[in-house]
Structures are given as structure tokens and as C-alpha cells.
């Protein structure tokens, strides 16, 4: 009976080593249920912290670009000044972007900020999300 337990432990260690691609140790003993649960709780808490931080970074980047677009339109584009608004109203237009004052340069500033936002969200945050996902799956 002792040899069957040893054979069973060796089989469990072999399967675990193949799954994790680690060398087989004859001293391997599986974790107890309470240790597994404790580890699961800590891994879940860590995952929640990492994902919350990632979402906060993504929202901060998005809010920063909203602020940039507002600055480009209303401060640099002078759409808050009453003279510019009156001039736009006389022409039957609204001053909502920097194109009214700066023309092609205003359009270029507005479009370039949108392109930069797309690059950051698609490329940078995509790569970061893949790295975070692979790191978190290795914890499980």
C-alpha cells in the first residue's frame, strides 16, 4: 500500500511537471486545500489591483486627450473669446474648433491629436494589455 501511494504521488508529480514544464522532483507534495484557497484569494486580489490600475491609466490617458482637444479648440483656437464668436456668428458659423481662426494648421492640430490617441490606444495599450494578461495567467 505504501508503494501504491508513492507511485500515485510520482504520477501526480509527473502530470504536474508536464503541465508546468518543470523538472520532476521525487520530493514534490501537492499543496493542501487551505493553502490552495489562500493562494487563490491572494492571486485574485493581486489581479484586481493590477486590472484596476490598468483601467485607471487608460481612463487618465483618455481624459488627458479630452483636455488637449478642449485646449486646442477653446484656448489656442480662441473660441472662448467674444470677438471670435461674434465674427463666427456674423458668418453664420459656430466656433467649435481651431480651424476657424488658424485654418489648415488648426485642422492639422486637431487631427494629429486624434491620430496620436488612436496610436496610443491601439498600439501601446494593446501591447500593455497583452503583457498584463500573460503575466496574470502565469500566476494562476
Image: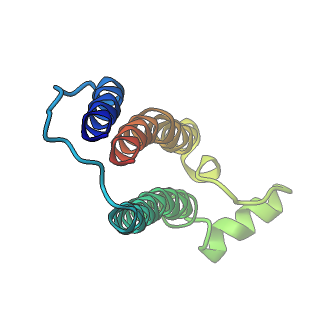
On the rendered structure, is 100 left or right of 78?
right
Q: Residue at x 54, y 47 (%)?
A: 102
Question: Looking at the image, which residue is at 51% across and 35% down?
Answer: 122
Q: Nearer the viewer, residue 113 or 34?
A: 34
Q: Residue at x 55, y 60 (%)?
A: 66
Q: Quadrant of residue 8?
A: top left
Where, by quadrant of the figure, is residue 104 drawn? Answer: top right
Name above or below for residue 74 compared with residue 31: below
- In this view, 63 is above or below 110: below
Nearer to us in this view, 53 or 87: 53
Q: Nearer the viewer, residue 128 or 124?
A: 128
Tell me residue 16's x, y (percent).
33, 33
Tell me residue 98's x, y (percent). Answer: 58, 52
Image quadrant holding the N terminus, namely top left
* Residue 109 in picture, x, y percent from top left: 49, 43
Is residue 9 rendered to the left or right of residue 91?
A: left
- Is the residue 7 above or below the residue 89 in the image? above
Q: Residue at x 47, y 56 (%)?
A: 58
Taking the view exactly as shown, the residue that stands out farthest to the bottom is 82
Q: How is the image coloured?
A: rainbow
Q: Is residue 91 left or right of residue 12?
A: right
Q: How many marks?
A: 0
Q: Residue furthest right?
A: 92
Q: Is residue 89 left or right of residue 113?
A: right
Residue 22 position within the rendered picture, expressed as x and y whole percent measured from the top left: 21, 28
Would you place residue 82 above or below residue 115 in this image? below
Amino acid at each position: 500500500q505504501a508503494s501504491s501511494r508513492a507511485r500515485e504521488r510520482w504520477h501526480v508529480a509527473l502530470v504536474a511537471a508536464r503541465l508546468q514544464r518543470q523538472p520532476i522532483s521525487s520530493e514534490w507534495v501537492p499543496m493542501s486545500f487551505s493553502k490552495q484557497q489562500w493562494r487563490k484569494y491572494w492571486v485574485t486580489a493581486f489581479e484586481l489591483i493590477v486590472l484596476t490600475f490598468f483601467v485607471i491609466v487608460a481612463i487618465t490617458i483618455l481624459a488627458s486627450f479630452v483636455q488637449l482637444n478642449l485646449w486646442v479648440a477653446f484656448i489656442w483656437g480662441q473660441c472662448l473669446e467674444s470677438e471670435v464668436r461674434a465674427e463666427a456668428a456674423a458668418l453664420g458659423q459656430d466656433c467649435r474648433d481651431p480651424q476657424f481662426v488658424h485654418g489648415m494648421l488648426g485642422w492639422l492640430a486637431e487631427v494629429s491629436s486624434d491620430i496620436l490617441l488612436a496610436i496610443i490606444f491601439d498600439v501601446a495599450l494593446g501591447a500593455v494589455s497583452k503583457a498584463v494578461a500573460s503575466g496574470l495567467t502565469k500566476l494562476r
